[in-house]
Amino acid sequence: MAQVLEFKLPDLGEGLTEAEIVRWLVEVGDVVAVDQPVVEVETAKALVDVPCPYGGVVTARFGEEGTELPVGAPLITVAVGAPASGGSAEETGAKTEGSGDVTEGSGNVLVGYGTSEAPARRRRVRRPAAPMVANGRPAVPEPAEGPVPVISPLVRKLARENGLDLRELTGSGPEGLILRADVEYALRAATAQGRTASQPTAASALTSAPEPTPASTAPVAGGIRTPLKGIRGAVADKLSRSRREIPDATCWVDADATELMRARAAMNASGGPKISLIALLARICTAALARYPELNSTVDMAAREVVQFEHVHIGFAAQTERGLVVPVVRDAHARDAESLTAEFARLTEAARTGTLTPGELTGGTFTLNNYGVFGVDGSTPIINHPEAAMLGVGRIVPKPWVHDGELAVRQIVQLSLTFDHRVCDGGTAGGFLRYVADCVEQPAVLLRTL
């Protein structure tokens, strides 16, 4: 006899208390195997595939795509112990003994943890006669959008909710990839053209009819409202907290990066993996933090203590279509330039594809922000709370510069350090920044720390 088990949204770690359903990976009536991912959710830190610890037939789903659920809320129910109508125990992919009952689940909450052996077969079998029901309501099948250059489920979801045909858009990403910005631009254009309320476009999803409010708080007519949730909400909360709690200050200096660029070119001409500029800058930061460890710290106001870290975990700002994320390179102080290059590349690609894990987005002790990729020279960034400092690097461009007593065209970069004034005074911050600039101007200075 089948037993119906309820699978709840698990604790995804790192203090997360809720997640948004991005995409269901199973339908009611599907047969699932132990540890098979059943739903893709977005937390405040990453996209996560959530596996079900039970094998059997999905009998219900809870929550539509776009719904936020708290940890512990029901996700799905699974009937274990009986194969789908007309199916065999082998087709279910579940473990059986004698009667065909499922004997165990994995207890997994995240892919890659718990069960060490996957079931022999993970074939999905659907019951044709089973009604497509979710939460007691007929499920509406997703309209076929055809082969369009879109890889983000969030972009597809935004377009689908607003009745936008992605096949009519020209993407601005690599090889015509349609980005979220392309969809939002199309929706704003549709709104500006005065679409009627009956047309399911931007006005139907990005704006909603507000409740009557006092004149002092009335929204601007025609404004587009974007909910601060998921990654954008988490970033908003963290930046607001940083501004409230951290008395920050910024100092900056121009540096001649000509010799650093020549050193990198020489490294890359010698064969082997190419060394990235950000890897060299990270190596310089770890050497500087060894001299000025006060900046590799955090402030514990409850204990009224400054806590210095023994390890250097460098975060770096990465702009993605889902918003700003800060992946963390663990133990950067123990890596050489080649290892740093490989890790920066791996985390950058994971950020772009939305596959960063919560653990790869937390635990940083210092942040490196290369805003030069946006074509700007300087910035006063907000510290990544609860860290104590962030080094900003502007674009490297040819400029007139006095070199060896003569005017010359050199590769100049502006470096800025934003720091928590509670952990050190300006002398320490200035010393750190000057050492970084010296290493940029004369890479041989690093030889002392190798």
Image (cartoon, grey):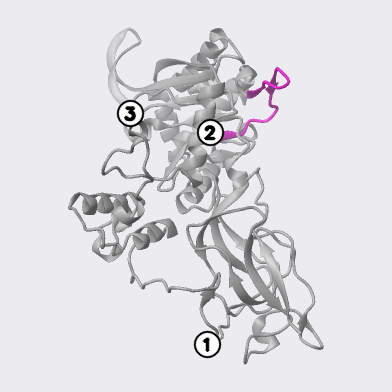
**Residue 282 colored magenta?**
no
Q: In front: 25, or 8?
A: 8
Query: In the picture shown, does residue 193 fall above or below 64?
Result: above
- If you read the primary sequence from the N terminus, does the residue marked by circle 3 or circle 1 appear first? 1
- If you read the primary sequence from the N terminus, does the residue marked by circle 2 or circle 3 appear first? 2
Q: Secondary structure at mark 2?
A: helix
Label ID, residue 128: 1
The mark closer to the camera, 3 or 1, is 1
The span shown in magenta is 297-314
Label ID, residue 238: 2
Q: In the image, what residue type sits under mark 1?
A: Pro
Image location of residue 155, percent across then percent down = 38, 57
Label ID, residue 376: 3
- The quadrant of the image that shows the N terminus is bottom right
Q: In front: 393, or 384?
A: 384
Q: Secondary structure at mark 3?
A: loop
Q: Is residue 281 visible?
A: no
Image location of residue 345, percent across then percent down = 49, 45
Image location of residue 319, percent across then percent down = 42, 41
